[in-house]
Each structure stands twice: as C-alpha cells, then as structure tokens.
Image: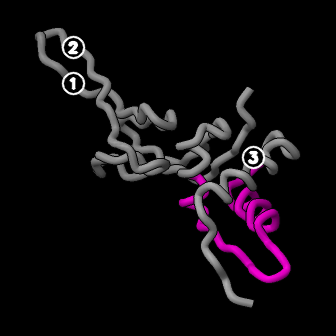
Amino acid sequence: MTYHIPSDERVIKSAKKIFKKYRTISSQRKLKELVEKELKTKEKQFHVSEHRLRNIVLKNGLADIEIHSREGDPDKILSRCPVCNNALKRVKNLTIWGGEVTIEFRCPNCGYWTGKKKRIPTLYVFHLKK
C-alpha cells in the first residue's frame, strides 16, 4: 500500500469529524493518528505530518490549542512562533528612565508567548471550540 498526501479540504473534513467525536485530544500525535485513520480508504493510505495538521487546525479555527512547554536557552532570540511560524509581536514596557524594554513575545495567531526564560513547546492539547 502506498502513501498519499491528502488535500487541506480533506484533512479539514476529517478533523471536524474527529473533534465532534472527541471534544479534547490530549496530544498532537494522537490527533494525527485519529485523522489518518479517518482518511484511510480501502485503496489508499493517507499521511499528514503533525506540523501540517497542527497548522491546518489553527488556521481554520477548528480547535483551541493548549501549549505545554519547558524552559529553553534564554540567550536564543525568537522571531517566529515555534507553534505556527507566525511573526512574534514584542510586548514592551517603559523603564523609569523613559526607555523601552521588551518583556515578552506573543503570537497573535495561536496564543504562544515567551519571556526572558524561553518556552519550548513540548505538548499540544486540542479542545473543540465552543
């Protein structure tokens, strides 16, 4: 059996069915397995990467995402979101001398944020949007 790459529309349709059945999915890997099982036909086995699936779910607003993370290297500078690859926005604060200092970075698309201690995503939990 050969693997095929499904269209975005097909992935969206399958993901919607999965979220109707399971309101919360505890990991990105589990979501991938469920969607691939839903996509499978007698003739074709479909494959979708975890990263692509996460981005499709976020871009189409199919579910809310809860991001669990660990601490990373504080010296590493992030310009793009590690969750959805969007540009991060700087959240600034004024100093007592009138200058500005960046206190954190936020993603306007998925809700990821990080401060001085860099947060590295380790687990994604998906919840059906209400």
Q: Callout 3 environment at 10 Å: few (<14), some (14 to 19), or many (20+)? A: some
Does the stretch in magenta take in 53? yes
Tell me the residue at 32%/32% (across/down). Answer: 89
Q: Which residues are magenta?
A: 25-54
Q: Which residue is mark 3?
A: 16
Badge 2 marks a residue whose secondary structure is strand
Horizontally, residue 80 falls left or right of residue 7, namely left
Among the 4 quarters of the image, the one containing residue 31 = bottom right
**Mark 2 or mark 3, which has the lower sequence index?**
3
What x and y, as percent, mark residue 105?
35, 34
What x and y, as percent, mark residue 128?
75, 36
Q: Which residue is mark 2?
A: 94
Gap between marks 2 and 1 measured at Cα: 6 Å
**Mark 1 and mark 2 in contact (Cβ < 8 Å)?**
yes
Q: Callout 1 environment at 10 Å: few (<14), some (14 to 19), or many (20+)? A: few
What x and y, as percent, mark residue 115?
38, 34
- Residue in front for this viewpoint, 108 or 46: 46
Label number found at residue 101: 1
Horizontally, residue 109 falls left or right of residue 37, namely left
Q: Amino acid at mark 2?
A: Leu
Gap between marks 2 and 3 measured at Cα: 44 Å
**Mark 1 or mark 3, which has the lower sequence index?**
3
